[in-house]
Amino acid sequence: MLAIDMMNLPLLTAMYTTGLLMAMAIPPPAWHLLLPVVLAIAWLPLRNTRVAACLLGFLTLAFGYSNYHLHSSPPLRSVVLQSLSEKTPHTFYARVLQTKSRPDGGKQLDLWIHHVLQNHQPVSAPGGMRLRIEKSERSFTCGDELAVRTRLRIPRRFGTPGEFDYPRHLAASGLQFTGFLPDDIGIALLKRANPSHLTELRTRMGKLIAYSVPDKDQQAWVRALIIGDKDMLNEAQRSRLAAMGLSHLFSISGFHLGLVAMFGYLALLTIIRHSEKLLLAIPPRRLLPVVLLPALWCYLEFTGQALPAIRAWLAAAVVAGLLCTRRCCNPVHAALAVALAILVATPMSLFTPSFQLSFAGVFGILVLVPRWSKYLPAMNGACYRITQLSLVKTVKIVVI
């Protein structure tokens, strides 16, 4: 079995990240996918020798390089989509991956195309497309099957130094193409998806907020806080949040997940303490975090599965697993394991501000707070915890 020493985890993470950064500057050769395989085959018989660590480092670097290009390029089966003329509209059969509404009445649909109509016959052509609709009053949900008549475009950079890399931004969401429609007349709903109970509850909550809060600006604040829907915040509101430094409070993240976990833990702990049998069957510190994980995932589903909150849930799952199995682990190594798992699954996350700021704050807290806590004056438990919370907030501000 492949056993990686936890002491090597920082080095492996650094090598994998270096491979991702190298991939930005070095075009991929045709055989780049074979390089990690060859290095893995070479490492297996030499894993107990002195050169094993060196081979493992190069293997991790090569895997990062290949994984970047694998996610940044369209699927190999998307040759049909790439060959379509950008000047001619085509009919695409697609499934809705994500929907976003804009305050100006427009919509943004992330679609997974599975067929395109050619010569009056549907042809298999998988690929992801971001469709922007200028004006739309129809509602679409994730999982809906649509037929869309539009022109397919391949996003390109202008070549300006330091410009926003829009193709890479799309690739982070698994999308390789874009499309535009002035209205939703060119969209036909083929099959309505069957949403989950939590998705239906979220939709009903959004309608209740719209009914209870008639003011559009206040409605946008409430939707962002309750159901994690920030799409209705206009530019003025977003600028105000950024100027006041409160954007993180109106974005469902690890902070909100931590509050839900804390109150859930305290509530269950109060119930368990009233029963000797429950205390013997469910040791609170070992098993309560594991019990809370499904409830926390339901909260993620209800609030729209924001990426920062998903990362926080993964970290909570790692900690819960360590507590359940009575294992000790360096907190920095646990955070590195979560970061590496995310980068392996979605390598483009490395270049998103959300990922960078989240883990900059996490590592800042894990590294600086224990060191700075030594200089806190002697005080009782409650005052010490309050002071340490202020210290954590100060570290986040300094680092981010």
Image (cartoon, rainbow, N blue to C red):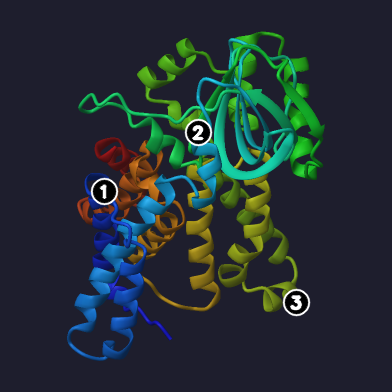
Q: Identify the disc placed on residue 349.
A: none
Q: Label 3 belongs to which residue?
A: 277
Residue shown at 59%/63% (left/top)? 289
**Does residue 300 appear in this view?**
yes
Q: Amino acid at mark 1?
A: Pro
Residue shown at 53%/70% (left/top)? 321
Q: Label 2 belongs to which residue?
A: 177
Q: Residue 270 in the image: x percent, y percent?
A: 68, 59
Q: Nearer the viewer, residue 346 or 5?
A: 346
Q: Amino acid at mark 3?
A: Lys
Q: Residue 400 in the image: x percent, y percent?
A: 29, 37
Circle 2: element type: strand
**Based on the displayed image, in which of its 4 quarters is residue 88 positioned?**
top right
Q: Count up the numbered dots.
A: 3
Instruction: Note whether 249 is above or below 345 in the view shown.
Output: above
Instruction: Note whether 256 is above or below 180 in the view shown.
Output: below
In the image, taking residue 330 as reference, residue 115 lies left or right, namely: right
Q: CA distance from mark 1 to mark 2?
A: 20 Å
Circle 1: element type: loop
- Which sits earlier in the primary sequence, circle 1 or circle 3? 1
Q: Nearer the viewer, residue 351 or 227?
A: 351
The crowd level at tag 3 (other Cα within 10 Å; few <14, some 14-19, many 20+) is few
The crowd level at tag 1 (other Cα within 10 Å; few <14, some 14-19, many 20+) is few
Q: Residue 222 in the image: x percent, y percent?
A: 63, 22
In the image, taking residue 196 as reference, residue 87 lies left or right, namely: left
Q: CA distance from mark 1 to mark 3?
A: 63 Å
**Based on the displayed image, in which of its 4 quarters is residue 246 positioned?**
top left
Instruction: Note whether 174 is above or below 165 in the view shown.
Output: below
In the image, taking residue 241 as reference, residue 104 lies left or right, namely: right
Q: Label 1 belongs to which residue?
A: 27
- Which sits earlier in the primary sequence, circle 1 or circle 2? 1
Residue shown at 50%/24% (left/top)? 86
